[in-house]
Amino acid sequence: MNDRIGCAADHRRVQHPAPPVMAACAGASRLAFHTHNRVRVAPTGAGATRLFSGSGGAVPGRPCGPVSNCARSSPDLARSTTLCAVDETSTAYEAAADRLATAAPGTAQVAVADLIRLAVADGELRQPVTDTICQWLRGPAGSSGVAVEERRIVLGSLTDRLRAQEAPWQGVSIDLSGTTLVDADFSGCRLGGAVFADTRFHGTTVFDGVTFEDEVIFQRAVFYDDASFTEVRFEGDTEFGRVRFRGRADFTSAAFGGMAWFGRGTDTWWEDDEAWETVEEIDPAPWEELNEDDPDWPVAVLIEDYQDWEEGGDGARFAGDASFAGVRFDGPAWFYNARFGAAATFAGARFAGRVHLDQPSVDLCDAHWAGGTEDGESEWPLGWTVRSDGTGGDLVPDSSVAPYSQQLADPDPSVRSAGLGSLNQLGDDRPELRQRVVATLCSFLRIPVPFDLHAQGRTAEQTTLLRLRQQAQQLLAERLRPGPGQWKDMNLWLCGATLVELDFSGCEGGYAEFAGAQFHGTTRFDGSRFDRAAFTLNGSSGRATFHGDVLFGAEPPDGVVFHRTVTSRA
């Protein structure tokens, strides 16, 4: 589509960097959601079988017959006595689990205490008891003060066992997906795997010093306040795809033993993966972000023949300060399309493998890269380079791109404005760097606007911020328009960006991605010509929104939302 704005169906495969592949085994899915086992209890009665399941599957030694027949059915008195004891334990467990499931408000902690006592006495019950407590926590949360406090007590009873100094419950996995937690404190716990997909964390959340022995999934979780992960140990792959940190996020001195996934990318499920059976149950928290109106953004897109699951749109979003100071990344560190809305420091971080971290606002002082390329080439912010020591090297300011020197990371608006001017000059002087300059400008525009654009009246600081963003927009527009200073065939990556009074009239370029972008004020695309353009991820999913008037030189794109007047000069 040479002469109009259009939607490209295949841009994800040819334009976006291929993410690293998760560790996999033959015949298994690359990435599994909702894979933690649940407690399964068969119907009771004569001849009934009870199966306790957890991370280790069926618990050996459980009874295979009714209680009344236990002693008489075995010729071995010692064995029958043991089986009776086991059966009494399982019966006590089922009774306590039933009491928790039917507990009246304010009484659940009594049933939880009974369950924990049983698990302390019988180690094989620890995973089933944990599953049962997690299942209760995944139920309706309730908003009263009594309900909130009860849930805190129940969670605290469980985490006390997971961090106990004497006889802790090591290797136990938890599934709190979709749960609402208030002031959750997991500090010092030692866990197997953990699922927090779509979990809503309110109040201060603490994971300081936690050790996760297996895969950890935080997909689409929302931290409404500060979150602390200092000195946490992730021994397996860790997924923070599309997580929203609305407060401060502190990962200082954390260690990621596998992949650290904070970005956008594609996860593949095999066609026969059981995860497809529950894909419809995934229930992300509504987006509800400032200046945006798509409650489903960023979306998960199901494409092709029920074989692919794509994490569309954004990576993790950090509204407040983010600290990865002193973090050790032993596997790939994937931050593609992650968005940092405030200061983001990786000072002193140690990277072993592939890194995709190109946001202009990050600080890499004293960081070191070991040179791993097994999963692909690394990408760093413009203005940083690796001072080679033969394999890897320290991250240092890149003097070859002077006069630009990470000014976009400076809190002083005047310094950032000068940095935009330096980028403009750099692109003029170094044609081979023009695409990197454009990508840096796009990344700058993808930083979330921290105030309501619809509110009446703006502070001087807010007005200055908007001027900076419009300066970046104008720089792009001027370099995309035909003429002596045009930068030809540039690709634009403005997925999810907030654009105010954007004027791309008469602009030309290669591929332009506006999926999920929010256009405020008057927007102009009349006379623009892009080889391909996308305003949605797939059909109407991940669609752009025009909050003000918009002018197109061709037919408006399908699947987007228009709140004001749309004019087409087709």
Image: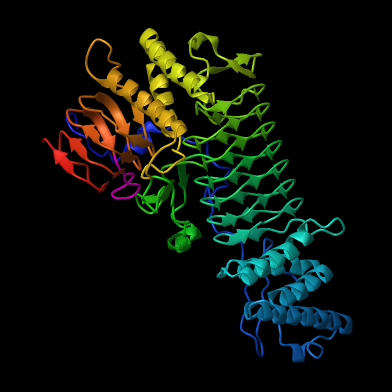
| Vertical side of 172 occupied by 341: above or below | above
Closer to us: 172 or 518: 518
Visible residue check, residue 12? yes
Residue 307 drawn in magenta: no
472 to the left or right of 215? left
451 to the left or right of 256? left
Q: Position of residue 541 (x, y in %)?
A: 33, 50
Q: How many marks?
A: 0
89 to the left or right of 149? right
- Taking the spot 66% from the left edge, 87% from the top edge, the residue there is 47
Specify the quadrant of the image occupied by residue 431: top left
Closer to us: 391 or 208: 208
Q: Position of residue 44 (x, y in %)?
A: 65, 86
Colour logic:
rainbow
- Taking the spot 46% from the left edge, 63% from the top edge, the residue there is 281
- Taking the spot 64% from the left edge, 34% from the top edge, the residue there is 324
Looking at the figure, which quarter contains the C terminus?
top left
The majority secondary structure of the magenta stretch comes to: loop
- Taking the spot 82% from the left edge, 88% from the top edge, the residue there is 71
Specify the quadrant of the image occupied by residue 180: bottom right
| Vertical side of 182 occupied by 519: above or below | above
Q: Which residues are magenta?
A: 535-544
Q: Position of residue 424 (x, y in %)?
A: 38, 15
